[in-house]
């Protein structure tokens, strides 16, 4: 008995969607936009998390050398660093190599660098740790020791940068949930309004159903399914657009933005995220329908 009723409710819901397709297109667009916003922010957060994990795995400490240090003195500093118990490898990067690396990543800024009249990039020593998961306290103690060397000006631990990237990722998720949540609320209101108009347009048919003894489920079911279908379809469209953005962004914008494009790019949503997005869309549609039914159908 349940399956035939569900089948009939589904047919009625699809008929309503087709009959009032202009209204439903508007609600579908708002729903897709709302969940696309959430999907894009989550996709951005995924990419930031991945970049942070990659930076953490490299576990490098960069020591910047004082200007004017001779090549021989720079080699001695590199040897001193490489002798550290935590260090697996130390690579000396001279100022000219640092300048060329920067220009290869940001070729559009070559004129700016040349206008300075000097090389603004210091020589540095990039180290890789033996244990990428070495305690931060031990690494910081080693950095403080090397900072005391007269040839070293400063030191940067990229694990700290990785944590900053993760923080930006968490912020992106929070902004996506906040801003996207407002748009989802707007989608619920729009779906509720569309379902309300449909109920009003078919009030005579609903009255006939009541007179012939139709149950509450038979009357309400098609409208609940109507909202559910709009919510699921809207969020599914958002999911497809988010996946397209994660694939097309590197091809069309990633190269132009260089390393910034790699950091602030889009990464495909995980399966739990994708399923959660579609489930949330269905929930928003059901909620919009339930509001309309509560207001207009007192049965």
Image (cartoon, rainbow, N blue to C red):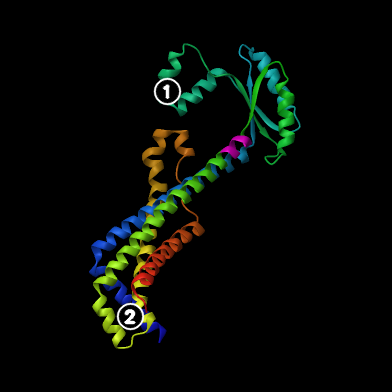
Other residues around mark 1 within 10 Å, as few (<14) / some (14–19) / many (≥20)? few
Quadrant assignment, res 6: bottom left
Does the magenta run of residues contain 140? no
Other residues around mark 2 within 10 Å, as few (<14) / some (14–19) / many (≥20)? some
Quadrant assignment, res 251: top left
Magenta segment range?
Answer: 159-164
- Residue drawn at x 68%, y 22% as measured from the top left: 78
In primary-sequence order, the first of circles 1 and 2 is 2
From the viewer's perspective, tell me whether residue 21 is left or right of residue 186.
left
SS for tag 1?
helix
Farthest right residue? 85
Q: Quadrant of the N terminus?
A: bottom left
Q: Position of residue 24 (x, y in %)?
A: 28, 63
- Residue drawn at x 33%, y 60% as measured from the top left: 190
Residue at which label 1 appears: 109
Q: Position of residue 237 (x, y in %)?
A: 36, 57
């Amino acid at each position: 008995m349940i399956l035939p009723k569900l089948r009939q409710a589904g047919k009625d819901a699809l008929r309503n969607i087709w009959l009032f397709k202009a209204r439903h297109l508007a609600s579908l667009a708002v729903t897709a936009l709302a969940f696309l916003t959430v999907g894009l922010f989550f996709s951005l957060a995924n990419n930031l998390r991945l970049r942070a994990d990659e930076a953490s795995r490299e576990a490098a400490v960069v020591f910047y050398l004082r200007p004017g240090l001779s090549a021989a003195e720079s080699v001695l500093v590199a040897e001193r660093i490489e002798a550290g118990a935590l260090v697996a490898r130390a690579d000396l990067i001279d100022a000219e190599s640092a300048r060329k690396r920067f220009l290869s990543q940001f070729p559009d800024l070559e004129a700016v660098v040349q206008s300075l009249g000097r090389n603004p990039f210091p020589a540095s020593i990039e180290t890789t740790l033996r244990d990428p998961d070495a305690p931060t306290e031990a690494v910081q103690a080693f950095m403080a020791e090397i900072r005391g060397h007269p040839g070293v000006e400063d030191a940067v631990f990229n694990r700290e940068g990785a944590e900053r990237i993760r923080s930006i990722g968490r912020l992106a998720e929070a902004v996506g949930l906040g801003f996207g949540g407002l748009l989802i609320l707007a989608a619920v209101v729009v779906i509720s309004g569309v379902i309300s108009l449909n109920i009003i347009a078919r009030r005579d048919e609903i009255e006939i159903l009541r007179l012939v003894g139709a149950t509450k489920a038979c009357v309400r079911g098609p409208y609940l399914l109507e909202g559910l279908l709009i919510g699921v379809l809207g969020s599914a469209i958002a999911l497809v657009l988010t996946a397209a953005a994660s694939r097309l962004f590197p091809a069309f914008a990633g190269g132009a933005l260089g390393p910034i494009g790699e950091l602030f790019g889009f990464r495909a949503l995980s399966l739990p995220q994708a399923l959660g997005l579609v489930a949330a869309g269905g929930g928003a549609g059901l909620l919009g329908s339930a509001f309309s039914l509560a207001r207009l159908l007192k049965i």
